Image: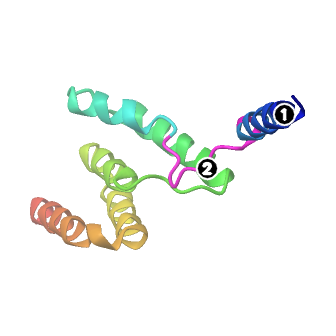
Amino acid sequence: MSERRVLTLALFSAVLLAGCSTPPKTLYQWEGYQPQVYEYFKGQGNAEQITVLEQDLQKIRAKGNMPPPGYHAHLGLLYAAIGKDDQMVQQFQTEKELFPESTPYMDFLLKKYKKREG
């Protein structure tokens, strides 16, 4: 009987320890990004979305986390839609710095908006 008790105690201890483990930290922090993208694709992109995304970006940075890929690109598109090309360029450049694999697409968008101006 003592062997059975030891096994039961060991099993109970393993379950208890497994329940106390902390979940792994996620690579990116999303905040309200996904609902904002959904609203944008429904045709409801506006200056209010910029405010929400900028506030969420501050929260993400305050926690020492990174926004997901596309966050700055989306923010840049919103700025472009309201004619704030300076902020658009800044957001596209930030996207390129954080995610170098986005460089060809960001360059394409920058070129597209440059043609629009000229």
* Count of residue discs: 2
Label 2 vs label 1, nearer the camera: 1
Residue drawn at 27 percent across, 67 percent down: 102
Please name the residue that numbered disc 2 is placed on: 24
Q: Quick check: is 92 in the magenta stretch?
A: no
Q: Main secondary structure of the magenta part?
A: loop
Give neighbour class at mark 2: few <14, some 14-19, many 20+ (Cα, 10 Å): few
26 or 96: nearer the viewer: 26
Residue 108 % position (x, y)? 15, 67
Mark 2 / mark 1, whichever is N-terminal: 1
Q: Residue at x 15, y 68 (%)?
A: 111
Q: How is the image coloured?
A: rainbow
Task: State whether residue 59 is above or below residue 114.
Answer: above
Q: Residues within 10 Å of mark 1 (few under 14, many from 20)?
A: few
Q: Tag 1: residue type?
A: Leu
The residue lying toward the viewer, choosing from 101 and 7, is: 7
Name the element at disc 1: helix
Left or right of 45 in this view: 116:
left
- Which quadrant holds the N terminus? top right
Quadrant showing the C terminus: bottom left
As drawn, the label of residue 77 is none
Residue 118 vs 55, above or below: the answer is below
Across and down, in percent, residue 100 comes to: 33, 73
Judging depth in this view, the residue of 73 and 64 nearest the camera is 64
What residue would you read off at disc 1?
9
Q: Identify the residue at image location x=41%, y=73%.
A: 97
- Amino acid under label 2? Pro
Magenta range? 19-30
Determine whether, in the image, residue 33 is placed left or right of residue 38: right
Residue for point 73% across, 34% down: 15
Left or right: 19 as drawn, with respect to 36: right
Q: Position of residue 38 (x, y in %)?
A: 29, 30
